Image (tube, rainbow, N blue to C red):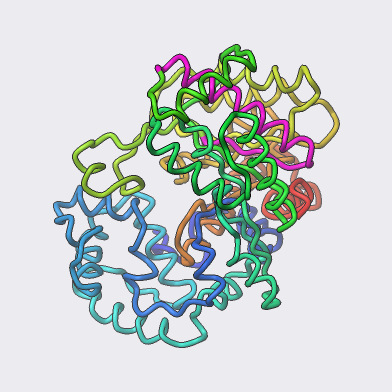
Amino acid sequence: MKTFMDENFMLQNKTAEKLYYDYAKEMPIIDYHCHLPPHEIAEDKIFSNMSKIWLEGDHYKWRAMRANGVAEKYCTGDAPDEEKFLKWAETVPHTLRNPLYHWAHMELRRPFGISRLLNPSTAKEIYDQTGQMLQTSEFSARNIMRKMNVELVCTTDDPADDLKHHIKTKQDGFEIKVLPTWRPDKAMAVENSDAYNDYLGKLEKASGVSITGFDDLISAINKRHDFFHDQGCRLSDHGLETFYAEDFKDGEIKKIFETVRSGKPVGQEMVSKFKSAMLVYFGIMDYDKGWTQQFHVGALRNNSSRMYNKLGADKGFDSIGDSEMARPMSRFFDRLDSDNKLAKTILYNLNPGDNAVMATMAGNFNDGSVPGKMQFGSGWWFLDQKDGMVDQINTLSNMGLLSRFVGMLTDSRSFLSYPRHDYFRRILCNLIGTDIENGEIPDDMELTGTMVKNICYYNAKNYLGL
């Protein structure tokens, strides 16, 4: 019987161990999609306790706590930090076979060096010990990133953001690159005219463009796109329920914009047309600057209207959706590709039933210009666990080129989430090591070890050009 989470955790044979220790373990981390708060990096934040760094903003943990019967005040509410942590510690033993159990203990081991299991009997001691460590400069935001061998992170930023925290971090001479990612979802969200017009006010202020017509909108967005590029941004990201690929004419889009700008609502057909047009314009902008575009698709958000009205978005009430995916995705990519304006692209699906759709759709639009131009991205959100990662790796292996895969990311708001890269690397090495021991691929460490190093680090570095 193996010991829980020993040094060979998830490595089930000697070849997997060799691949991990010799080729994967020490690779730097390129975290090209995350939700770290840029101001916490800029100010090199010191966290007062584990609840502040570990529980705030973590909807994964909140969902588990609610499922365990924990009251909302200990999740998003105003309960004292220590009480929130103790409620999380009560929940952890009930997360067995959920990835949270693995992640929690991996994150206690690195960077804190704590190997005890977290449960009600150890919670107070662990809370006090980590709290003392966190209040030292050794565990500041930047020093945690250094401890975890991070080379680069890309945050998630709105076109109206001023990026002052990215600018300060760079001016400080912080050796780890902290770059913005262009996330323009709000710039096309015309389904709520009041919220959209409020957003346009922010975009006007950021761009210096008075937005009265659709051409003004595009001008303002172009200015912000240029600004992001000047600050080192080379990736965009779109969070979509599905792809939008309706036929549209420029005149139609201008009329839709005028209607929304006047404060009037528009129907779903017009919303879909507008979003279709904006995705095309965004895609062309990205192509013209040599960026990589990312699409996170398939979430059905804010399912509990009661809790959304009480707490707002991103509080743990989202789930996997089942929207039509293949046909609109094909039409969208084909439109850009037909005009030779299809940028490098990474696709992330939330519904595991879309794995093969994503992998085969990506293959339709590779053109030989860039190795792995169209990427089937890593397991995302509900799929960034062992089974989800294995399924993604196996699907990509069967229907594309695993060797060109750009690898793992955290997609996290927490500075303690970097062990997810280690989790992925162990799973990857175990899969390849098992294939070698089964005689399914050659026992050639130069061949397979190089592939592992590329997936863990070099592919992303070369592909993204960062």
**The C terminus is located in which quarter?**
bottom right
192 lies left or right of 436: left
Which percent across, then down, holds residue 328? 56, 17
Q: Which stretch appears magenta? A: 267-296
Which percent across, then down, holds residue 440? 68, 35
Which percent across, then down, holds residue 260? 45, 27
Foreground residue among 66 and 189: 189
373 lies left or right of 82: right
Q: How many labels does the image show?
A: 0
Foreground residue among 237 and 192: 192
**The N terminus is located in which quarter?**
bottom left
Foreground residue among 324 and 125: 324
182 magenta-colored: no
143 lies left or right of 460: left
Residue at point 25%, 69% (across, down): 85
Foreground residue among 150 and 9: 150
Which percent across, then down, holds residue 365? 73, 23
Residue at point 58%, 30% (across, down): 213
Residue at point 29%, 83% (across, down): 128
195 lies left or right of 145: left
Q: Which residue lies furthest to the right in this view?
A: 369
280 magenta-colored: yes
Residue at point 54%, 64% (across, down): 38
User: To which quarter of the image does residue 375 belong?
Assistant: top right
Tell me if residue 157 comes above or below residue 171 in the rendering.
above
Classified by dominant secondary structure, the portion drawn in magenta counts as helix
